[in-house]
Image (cartoon, helix red, strand yellow):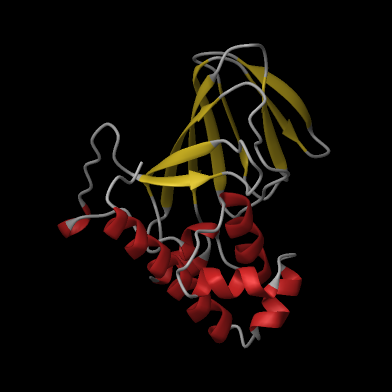
Amino acid sequence: MLKNPDATDDVRAAVGQAIRRAREAAGLSMRALARASEMSQPFLSQVEKGETSPSLSSLYRLAHALGLPPSQLMPPVSAPRGVSVLRQGEGRELRVSDAPGAASGRLLSGGAGHLLEVVEYRVEPGADLGGWFESDGEMTVYVVDGEVEVTLEHEGSWRLGAGDAISHPADIRHRWAVAGDAAARILLSVAHTHPAVART
């Protein structure tokens, strides 16, 4: 998680600027984007100004309304020459939803300009995991610890334990739930194919 308040402010500002640029490039007013992404205009205004951070669920809704992969709205995790090293406890925090008690993840790799997005989640039983998600590209969910129920709309549900993985096209609507009484640790990898990523 981010421990430096200045770094947190920088991330919020970068996300807000990316959303505003994408909205303007799409020719959408703030009101139109708020309506299309099912959020209030005041909240979207706060996000664009860098005053608050959108949850992962909100980012997915915004990206869907803009016709972009969610990674395009996140600042990249990178260093000179594309090398990135994250130490334990470092990395940007991504809340899954805006609900109280929502699960959060740690962005290990990804953001604008990256084709590969990797997020580590530690999810307590009963934690909110948002609703349905979809994106471009291909997704792999790997369970490090615990048990997770992965549901793919119109395809089925699978219960995964430690060491299990599931891969699927990311444009199939999907959702997760912790199965059992123990916390789960999950690695989510998304290989994006959206041309907006490749052009960056």
Asked if residue 66 can be seen in this view, the reply is no
From the top left corner, tell me how far across and down residue 24 is, in percent. 55, 85
From the top left corner, tell me how far across and down residue 69 is, in percent. 55, 60
From the top left corner, tell me how far across and down residue 167 is, in percent. 58, 33
From the top left corner, tell me how far across and down residue 12 is, in percent. 42, 63
- Residue 26 vs 112, above or below: the answer is below
The single residue placed furthest to the right in the displayed view is 154
The one of 126 and 85 positioned closer to us in this rendering: 126
Q: Quadrant of the N terminus?
A: top left
Asked if residue 69 can be seen in this view, the reply is yes
The one of 183 and 189 positioned closer to us in this rendering: 183
- Residue 195 vs 184, above or below: the answer is below
The one of 168 and 2 positioned closer to us in this rendering: 2
- Residue 64 vs 147, above or below: the answer is below
The single residue placed furthest to the left in the displayed view is 80
The quarter of the picture where residue 90 lies is top left
Residue at 17% over, 58% down: 81
Residue at 53% over, 45% down: 95
Residue at 64% over, 81% down: 30
Residue at 48% over, 46% down: 94
Q: Quadrant of the C terminus?
A: bottom left
The one of 132 and 196 positioned closer to us in this rendering: 132
